[in-house]
Amino acid sequence: MTTYSESTVALQLDADLSNADIAPVPANRRTWKTVNFFALWVGMAVCIPTYMIAASMIQGGMSWSQAMLTVLLGNCIVLLPMLLSGHAGARYGIPFPVFARAAFGIRGSNIPALLRAIVACGWFGIQTWIGGAAIYTIALIMAPQLADAPTILPAFLDVSLVQFICFMIFWCINIYLIWRGVESIKVLETMAAPFLLLCGVGLLMWAYTRADGFGPMLDAPSQFTSSSEFWAFFFPALTAMVGFWATLSLNISDFTRYAINQRSQLKGQILGLPITMTFFAFIGVAVTSATLVIFGEAIWDPVILVRRFDSPLVVSFAMLAVVIATLSTNVAANVVGPANDFSNLWPAKINFKRGGYITGVIGIVMMPWKLLSDPNGYIFTWLIGYSALLGPIVAIMIVDYFVLRRRQLYTEDLYRHQGRYRYQAGFNPMAIAALLIGVLPNVPGFLVQIGLLQADNWPIAVELYHYAWFLGFALAGFSYYLLMVRNIKESL
């Protein structure tokens, strides 16, 4: 048994279910204000994937205004579960895996925690690869001959030695911030936010000036010849957009647990997420439109774009901005969550730092450069695929917390084997059943997407997969309510 102080109340917590990193945050350490949550979202949203998110939509046939509307709508939709799941963190000071114990059980919480952690490891690798690519660009400016360096690594890796070294340099920077702890992430986000916004506006002004306007892309109409064609593309794109932040809608309590009050996390997120995402996605579309006029081709990747600049100093500065933008996104969105998730698996042995190191290693093993090699696979396999897993989880947690428990949790019992959330040997079979009900209808569509099933044989499954997050959210939430409503009294 371990004693932790929560304000003036001493909590008696089972030692093997807690450590200093996942224990409730005491009131005197809840210091995040509205500006900190706003800066957090600026730091996470201003990144290369956001810049490029509208690219697939326009390439798929949307006009720029349709793409922007899809981005805005998707972020407004995912903001709602973000605010709801963040409520428990701000009220009780608990991280996501501990919050999940209320619905899934003391041991069962490891199921959603590990699912979320593996997705985050993939994102960690993707963002680290992007940051490494920016460092690689700076290295080529300083030593152009590096572009012709021999590939010493095994052929199946499909990456040069110099590129891999740059990837590992950026990886080490991330690991250093993990070693420094959560407070260093707060400082990084607060300092990076104004710099990143200024860089985005500066890039927008450069494009507008050089192209005498943003070019033909903003004038181009939608390529869809009928409303049915548009809707057939719109809903998968919207699902992918919701999936973009489906991870954070689960573990936002990892941050809101530090909120000075409920109001600060609500205002900070409402102001920070949809506005920043839509604005930076617009910068991506507008600047890319201008590149058609300036260079005669559409250049969606900003890392490739800045290599076209004439001044080595400007290129180096731009790449530094990319490094900072990617770093601020990576450590907040893809380290804090999985670090706590792995810690929840074995609190006595894995603390926040060790959980972060595990995330870093898995991020390398997943070979993120291969995930990014196919834009279609990135959007429709990666984003929609994991949204089919995470949508049901957040639905179960929201229904459990708001509908069944009416926002009432017993903090001490979340850290005790014999408390209200023990269920059956630490697992809640109702939550697991609801998760399966939410996930299974999307499995055939995912298997079609990765080529293991033929689309012609599964037309309904393919159609359902386009709505993966929404379908999983609705099925899991509704089934969990029906399964639990008669049994909830035991754990209230």
Image (spheres, grey):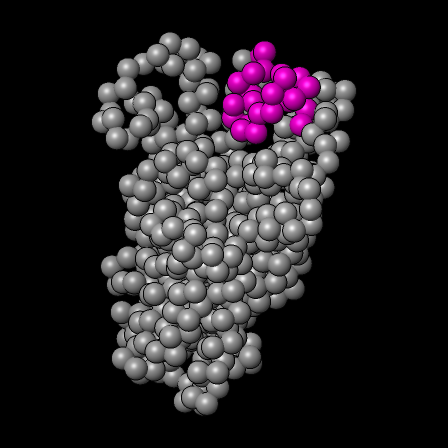
Residue drawn at x 57%, y 67% as measured from the top left: 84
Identify the magenta region. Answer: 289-311
In this view, the residue farthest toward the front is: 456
Q: Is residue 359 highlighted in magenta?
A: no
Percent coordinates x, y for residue 203 in the rendering: 65, 27
Residue drawn at x 44%, y 68% as measured from the top left: 438
Name the image quarter holding the N terminus.
bottom left
Instruction: Using the rendered image of the protein, determine whether residue 151 is visible from the camera's viewpoint.
Output: yes
Q: Is residue 290 highlighted in magenta?
A: yes
Percent coordinates x, y for residue 415 in the rendering: 36, 74
> Which one is nearer the viewer's eye here, 413 or 288?
288
- The picture quadrant where one finds residue 433 is bottom left
- The picture quadrant where one finds residue 211 is top right
In this view, the residue farthest toward the top is: 145
Looking at the image, residue 99 sits to the left or right of residue 215; the answer is left
Number of numbered discs visible in the structure rendering: 0
> Which one is nearer the viewer's eye here, 439 or 86?
439
Residue drawn at x 48%, y 60% as measured from the top left: 460
Instruction: Using the rendered image of the protein, determine whether residue 13 is visible from the camera's viewpoint.
Output: no
Residue drawn at x 77%, y 20% as measured from the top left: 212
> Which one is nearer the viewer's eye here, 314 or 62?
62
Up-down: is 336 above or below 66? below
Percent coordinates x, y for residue 33 in the rendering: 61, 56
Up-down: is 200 above or below 328? above
- The picture quadrant where one finds residue 280 is top right
Up-down: is 212 above or below 395? above
Percent coordinates x, y for residue 296 in the rendering: 63, 17
Up-down: is 447 above or below 3? above
